[in-house]
Image: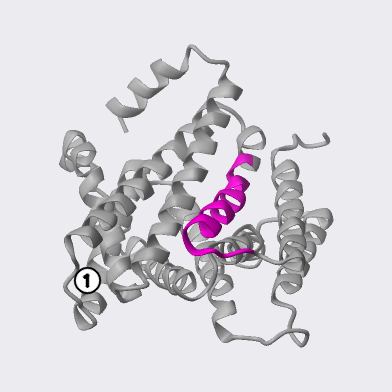
Amino acid sequence: MSGAPTALARRLRRLPAPVAASALMLTAALGFAAMNAIIRLLTHTLPPFEVSFFRNVFGLMVMLPVFVRLGPAVLKTGRHGLFAVRGVIHTSANWLWFFALAYLPVDQATALNFTVPVFATIGAALVLGERVARARWMAIAVGIGGSLVILRPGFQAFAPTMLLPIAAALGMGANMLVSKVLARTESPATMVIYMNLYMTALTLGPALVVWQSPSAGELLLGLMMGALGSASHFLWAQAFRLVDASVVAPFDLARLPFGAILGFALFGELMDGLSWLGAAIIFAANLYMIRTESRPPGG
């Protein structure tokens, strides 16, 4: 995306690249955590389907000036079918995530959602035929084990809603695979605008079925949610443009402590010790996979 990234990059040149990228990723992680907290607030009074629509339509509105500047060429593609598939997958995962935040504490849902790389790696091996090293399979097993520590099947009262963030992570992992295929031929700008367009269109119908007239305060929160989502995605992408993934990807894990702080401050939610242990196990598996992914061959 032309002007905005260039202007931001000029401002960041005064800082060492790792420092600037880390600051961007931490800011994005805080933005995502704040967005999740707003989703939980809104789903207390509005149906999750309607909140999901607000996230997409307001996010599209925030990004529209950038797309207008790029012109109609950004819509040119020969892969409308795959874009439609991606839109359905991403929308379904989005709905599952919004319902997860409606019924579960923010920190617990966030911790379980960090299984996205696990499902993406499994899918890359099974669907795309990518080779996955034995050590990476071990990290995947550890990540799944961390999820089981949080869920504790058979050791605590199990609620089906606890599976929602994992189901969302499965959908997000599938979305990553489709995005990887599209990225071979499509520009990032084209991928972003079609994602926003499809998700706004797909979430409109279910939102209308359960529609409740939002208050002015709820609309303002919806606008903040959309702006935070779009801005955080932009900062996240900029961080990866500045340095290698191994430098900044671990800072994305800050979403959990940020989410825990906001969950406690806004809703009085506090994750128990075993859940923190499970989250730490998932973190460790993610960090190991990040390091393995970025290590040069033979390194």
Q: Position of residue 250 (x, y in %)?
A: 65, 42
Residue that badge 1 annotates: 204
**Residue 50 sits above or below residue 258 on the image:** below
Picture quadrant where residue 91 is located: bottom left
In the rendered view, does 114 fall on the left or right side of 228?
right
Q: Is 102 one of the magenta-colored residues?
A: no
Dominant SS in magenta: helix
Query: Which of the two residues, 118 or 298, is positioned nearer the viewer here?
Result: 118
Hey, which quadrant is residue 68 in on the image?
A: top left
Asked if residue 269 is among those painted magenta in the image, a careful observer would answer: yes
Magenta region, residue range: 251-270
For the residue marked with disc 1, what is the amino acid? Leu
Within 10 angstroms of label 1, few (less than 14), some, or many (20 or more) residues? some
Indicate left or right for 162 with 137 as reference. left
Answer whether residue 78 is visible to the viewer in this image: no
In the rendered image of this protein, does residue 144 appear above or below residue 245? below
Q: Position of residue 52 (x, y in %)?
A: 32, 67
Where disc 1 sits, the SS reads helix
In the rendered image, is residue 216 in sight?
yes
Residue in the picture at 83% in, 57% down = 134
Relative depth, front residue between 124 and 49 = 49
Please state which of residues 131 and 39 is positioned toward the viewer in this rendering: 39
Residue drawn at (21%, 77%) of the image = 205
Taking the spot 41% from the left edge, 21% from the top edge, the residue there is: 9
Quadrant of the image containing the C terminus: top right
Side (left or right) of 255 relative to 45: right
Left or right, 143 with respect to 72, comes to right
